[in-house]
């Protein structure tokens, strides 16, 4: 089933360069009105990550794209889109490349101890309705050594993990199909199954982490996720804290 008027990727705008595909889409009312539009750039000069981080660009060796969604979901469910986007990337890497990705809340995709994909989900109200921009950056070809020195230990690429060059066009098509499938399932009410699948790929129960509080960073342990996709953390005092947003540091 395809939910929504047009499928994801019904129109694809390909650019040799953009500052940030997410910014480009967010700043264009016309793009934002186009559910399913995808904007992909070979290179980003100012790629953005979550919590104000930069996203490093390797020209021609990453898939860096943004897609527009008009989710007919209650506002409290929109954070689920973020988890579902990460799950769809993880499923795609499993199916297409026989990899075993690990999801880190809310939507980083890791291979072993290194991050291979980051997702930045942003929302803007337009005409009284939420317009969601899902920005995906996936390190395909090249090697960790191609990144700036401070990132080389923490990032990886698909080519590095598989030992083979990645056919980026084929993978891009599979990623869009995977996003469509996951989005359709969410809108069809399969939220519980999706969250179970997310949890299975995240293996987060009991994982030690440091979470931000108004009083500063605190240690805790991941317990699981809520039906809305928020993270449940066991505090050092044994209480349960519901974490909505803000950067976590995974210490194991
Ligand atoms: C993160 O890891 O913190 C999220 C990274 C998201 C990067 C993608 S690349 C395409 C889109 N445009 C951006 O500026 N960011 C996202």
Image: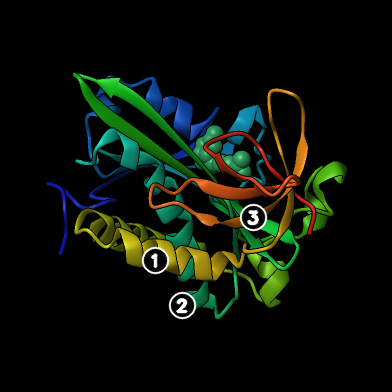
From this view, report whether residue 215 is shown above or below residue 49: above
The single residue placed furthest to the right in the displayed view is 149
> Could you say which is closer to the camera, residue 239 or residue 127?
239
Residue positioned 16% across, 59% down in the render: 2
Residue beneath disc 3: 222
Q: Which residue is the extreme one toward the bottom?
A: 98
Whether residue 89 is situated above or below residue 100 in the rendered picture = above
Q: Which residue is mark 1?
A: 174
Give the Cα distance between marks 1 and 3: 31 Å
Q: Are marks 2 and 1 in contact (CB under 8 Å)?
A: yes
* Labels 1, 3: front one: 3
Residue 169 at x, y percent in the picture: 45, 62
Residue to which mark 2 is pinned: 95
Q: Earlier in the sequence, mark 1 or mark 3?
A: 1
Q: Residues within 10 Å of mark 3 (few under 14, many from 20)?
A: many
Compared with residue 138, is residue 50 higher up or lower down, i.e. above or below? above
């Amino acid at each position: 089933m395809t939910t929504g008027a047009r499928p994801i990727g019904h129109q694809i705008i390909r650019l040799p360069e953009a500052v940030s595909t997410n910014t480009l889409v967010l700043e264009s009312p016309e793009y934002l009105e186009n559910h399913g539009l995808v904007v992909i750039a070979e290179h980003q000069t100012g790629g953005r990550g979550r919590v104000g981080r930069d996203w490093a660009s390797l020209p021609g060796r990453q898939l860096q794209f943004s897609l527009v969604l008009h989710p007919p979901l209650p506002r409290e469910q929109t954070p689920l889109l973020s988890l579902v986007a990460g799950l769809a990337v993880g499923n795609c890497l499993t199916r297409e490349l026989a990899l075993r990705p690990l999801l880190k809340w809310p939507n980083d995709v890791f291979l072993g101890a290194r991050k291979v994909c980051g997702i930045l989900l942003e929302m803007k109200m337009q005409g009284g309705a939420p317009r969601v921009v899902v920005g995906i950056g996936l390190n395909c070809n090249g090697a960790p050594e191609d990144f700036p020195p401070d990132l080389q230990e923490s990032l990886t690429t698909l080519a590095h993990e598989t030992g083979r060059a990645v056919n980026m066009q084929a993978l891009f098509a599979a990623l869009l199909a995977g996003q469509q499938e996951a989005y359709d399932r969410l809108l069809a009410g399969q939220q519980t199954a999706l969250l179970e699948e997310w949890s299975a790929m995240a293996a987060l129960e009991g994982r030690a982490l440091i979470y931000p509080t108004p009083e500063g960073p605190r240690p805790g342990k991941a317990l699981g996720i809520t039906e809305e996709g928020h993270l449940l953390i066991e505090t050092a005092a044994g209480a349960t804290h519901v974490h909505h947003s803000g950067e976590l540091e995974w210490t194991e």
